[in-house]
Amino acid sequence: MADDSANDDQLPLIYKLILKIPKLSLGGASEKVQGIFWAVILPVLVMCEFLINLMLLTYAHFPFNVLSVILFNSVVGLLAIRILVERALNSEKAILNQGHFEWKVEETFNEYLRCLRKDEDEEEPSTASTSK
């Protein structure tokens, strides 16, 4: 966490302001709930927002309709920008911190070969008993 605050001090002012916008957090929910939210519920809410904007523009009176549509769209836009900036910063951190990762390719490959041999050894007795 100390590294995050040190990196946040080096960010441009506009990024700092954008990151102060509260975001919708589903951190306590399971991965299935988060997936359902981002894949189903959020697109439905965006479509509903479009329909509400359309209804407000056509059925409401002049000053109210324009102000409400601008307000709805700016809130949704700010939330989207907040999420995009956070994702861009996270991917940048992942790319820059890539040198700390140890690649154990040979060890992993040897473990994979051991697993394959074990699977082949387990399959051989079953095929030999069926051929008799």
Image: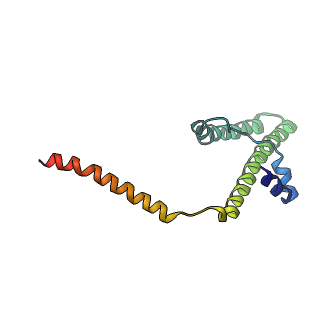
Q: Give the percent coordinates (x, y) of residue 34.
A: 62, 39
**Residue 55: which quarter of the image?**
top right
Front residue of this view, candidates 116 and 30: 116
Front residue of this view, candidates 115 and 17: 115
Q: Which residue is at the far left? A: 132
Identify which residue is drawn at 78% across, 55% down. 3
Rendering colour mode: rainbow
Instruction: Please say if 74 is above or below 92.
Output: above
Instruction: Please say if 48 is above or below 98.
Output: above
Identify which residue is drawn at 22% across, 46% down. 126
Q: Give the percent coordinates (x, y) of residue 33.
A: 60, 35
Identify which residue is drawn at 67% across, 35% down. 28
| Horizontal side of residue 123 vs 21, given as left or right | left
Front residue of this view, candidates 28 and 86: 28
Front residue of this view, candidates 80 and 72: 80
Identify which residue is drawn at 76% across, 43% down. 76
| Total marks in image | 0
Q: Give the percent coordinates (x, y) of residue 41.
A: 62, 37
| Horizontal side of residue 122 vs 9, given as left or right | left
**Residue 46: which quarter of the image?**
top right
